[in-house]
Image: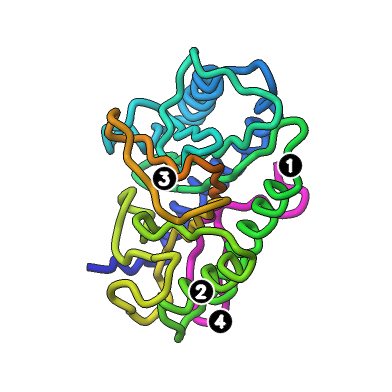
């Protein structure tokens, strides 16, 4: 069942999302060569607790405040003091905050040091896919319009689009209906209506769109072990516009 949010609920989700955007503003500069993914996760825990929130992923049983996925890891990489970030890595951060019962969800892939030209293109295409999906996310359209917008950009650039995992409703729980595939014509195709709060998240691979689940039963990797990129925003749909909740306004700290 799709949960339509009222004005009070959207305001609560917005506050959680703005807090998450502030976390990213502080966290991204720390993603550099020589830092462990475990250290980054500890920073996230400290920040989230300092604002009176809880890491949203804990409620899902995930062993970290942040999913930190490096290179061929697509999503759900488990942070560890043993995993040291290296020059040339693509580091995907996927974080959610539970702030007073309201859930935010956002992801970004950060290039570390010098990365290859094809990897730079992957980052650019995944970002453009995300914003094309957001542009298609408007009242009166359908979920499949988001899927088509994401897929067309990534596929036309020759990249693999992950089809086994997808975006979703969010806000009062971590994962809500509807599912938002990044490949069109996969599953239900509900109408987009005001009050929907959605996490749109392209997962685009340098090679195949196929993925494998590692024995830890969390980490998802590309089947050909080529690098992946993950970008995500939480948005709220209104009658006349769609608001990106997980983004700071100009001048906002």
Q: Secondary structure at mark 2?
A: loop
Identity of the residue furthest to the left in this view: 1
N-terminal-most mark, 2 or 1: 1
N-terminal-most mark, 1 or 4: 1
Q: Nearer the viewer, residue 141 or 145?
A: 145
Image point 62% across, 52% down: which residue?
A: 247
Residue 250 among magenta residues: yes
Rounded to the nearest angstrom, the CA distance separating label 2 from label 1 is: 32 Å
Rounded to the nearest angstrom, the CA distance separating label 3 from label 1 is: 20 Å
Q: Nearer the viewer, residue 83 or 1?
A: 83
| Residue mark closest to the camera, 2 vs 4 | 2
Q: Which residues are magenta?
A: 232-253
52 to 158, vertically: above or below: above
Residue where numbered disc 3 is placed: 223
Q: Main secondary structure of the magenta part?
A: loop
Residue where numbered disc 4 is placed: 240
Rounded to the nearest angstrom, the CA distance separating label 1 from label 4 is: 41 Å
Q: Secondary structure at mark 1?
A: loop
Residue where numbered disc 1 is placed: 116
Q: Residues within 10 Å of mark 3 (few under 14, many from 20)?
A: some
């Amino acid at each position: 069942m799709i949960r339509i949010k009222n004005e009070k609920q959207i305001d609560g989700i917005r506050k959680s999302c703005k807090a998450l955007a502030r976390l990213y503003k502080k966290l991204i500069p720390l993603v550099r060569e020589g830092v462990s993914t475990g250290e980054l996760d500890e920073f996230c825990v400290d920040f989230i607790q300092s604002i009176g929130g809880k890491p949203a992923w804990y409620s899902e049983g995930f062993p970290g405040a942040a999913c930190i996925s490096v290179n061929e890891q697509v999503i759900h990489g488990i942070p560890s003091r043993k995993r040291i970030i290296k020059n040339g890595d693509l580091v995907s951060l996927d974080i959610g905050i539970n702030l007073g019962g309201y859930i935010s969800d956002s992801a970004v892939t950060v290039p570390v040091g010098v990365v290859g030209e094809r990897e730079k293109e992957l980052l650019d295409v995944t970002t453009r896919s995300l914003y094309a999906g957001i542009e298609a996310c408007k009242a009166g359209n359908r979920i499949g319009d988001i899927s088509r917008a994401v897929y067309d950009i990534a596929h036309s650039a020759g990249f693999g689009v992950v089809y086994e995992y997808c975006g979703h409703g969010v806000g009062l729980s971590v994962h809500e209906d509807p599912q938002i595939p990044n490949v069109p014509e996969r599953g239900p195709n509900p109408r987009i209506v005001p009050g929907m709060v959605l996490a749109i998240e392209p997962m685009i691979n340098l090679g195949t769109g196929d993925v494998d689940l590692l024995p830890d039963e969390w980490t998802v990797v590309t089947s050909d072990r080529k690098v992946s990129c993950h970008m995500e925003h939480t948005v709220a749909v209104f009658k006349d516009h769609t608001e990106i909740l997980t983004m700071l306004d100009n001048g906002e700290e």
